[in-house]
Amino acid sequence: MQFLYHPDAGATIVDVEGDVYRYLFKVRRHKRDETIALRNLEDDSIYFYKIERVSKKEATLLLERKESRRVMPRRYLHIGWCTVDPKTVEKSLPLLNELGVAKISFVYCARSQKNFRIDMERMRRILINSSQQCGRSELMELEILGSTEEYLLRYPKSAVLDFGGVPLSCEAGVESILIGCEGGFDEKERKLFAKRPIYGVDTPIVLRSESAVTVAAAMSL
């Protein structure tokens, strides 16, 4: 663990209880007077706290110092991911977080199953746990959009990953890219892509949606 997330990190005194308390003192076995690192995942600072007091169910931490320490990839990448099974997203999200994806827009495209529902709070918890492990200092942004048309209107400069496009490479410098769900895009959607950069993956093997998303993320490093 690189740090522990706490929304009050930065305050002079922080009280911990519940799951945070159990993790610190039952799992990690921290003791009084030890120092632990906290982040609030809203600024670039990491805060170091001394464990001042420990009782049976709660503890008090006292701020000792802070350091400005931004831990983010050098390149920005926004992915429009046409909605797939949330279980697939949950498995892929920690990896995409480690690879430094800045933002994901979950898009209900023509071939997305409309019964798929993204639990944003659950996704946020997954991102917090991942960031604590990999050290990332800012949470990935997440949003849900109702259609491909809505996505394209909101992100007019976004590229598209589709069959037959120019092979995607690190040199492409893509900052925003839309990736289809299982089955890809339909013909009505492809007509909307007429004036946009179209990229593909240089392999004869058909990739799953989550594999294509991972390739795009890796190309942004």
Image (spheres, grey):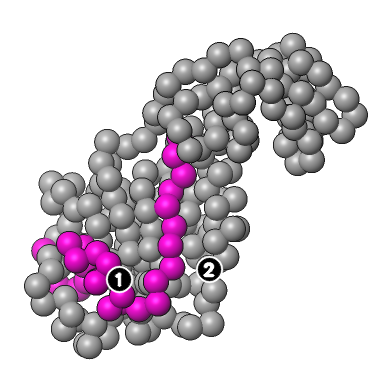
Three-letter residue code for mark 2: Ile
**Residue 58 is one of the magenta-drawn residues:** no
Q: Residue at (36%, 48%) from the top-left corner?
A: 102
- Indicate the secondary structure of the residue bearing disc 2: loop
Does 82 sit above or below residue 71?
A: below
Q: Is residue 192 visible?
A: yes
In the image, is 116 to the left or to the right of 54? Answer: left
* Front of the two marks 2 and 1: 1
Gap in angstroms between the C-alphas marked 2 and 1: 17 Å
Question: Which image quarter holds the N terminus?
Answer: top right
Which residue is more in the foreground, 77 or 201? 77
Q: Mark 1 points at which residue?
A: 151
Q: Residue at (16%, 76%) from the top-left corner?
A: 193
Question: For residue 179, which quarter of the picture?
Answer: bottom left
- Indicate the secondary structure of the residue bearing disc 1: helix
Q: What stretch is highlighted in magenta?
A: 137-166
Does 22 sit above or below residue 212?
A: above
In the image, is 106 to the left or to the right of 30? Answer: left
**Sequence order check, earlier mark of 2 and 1:** 2
Q: Can residue 38 be seen in this view?
A: no
Which residue is more in the foreground, 209 or 65? 65
Task: Count neighbours of disc 1 (C-alpha within 10 A) and say few if under 14, some if 14 to 19, many if 20 or more.
Answer: many
Q: Given contact means CB atoms under 8 Å apart, are the residues at marks 2 and 1 in contact?
A: no
Q: Name the residue under label 2.
A: 118
Residue 160, given in percent of the width and then of the height, sits at 21, 67
Residue 190, given in percent of the width and then of the height, sits at 19, 81
Question: For residue 150, which quarter of the picture?
Answer: bottom left
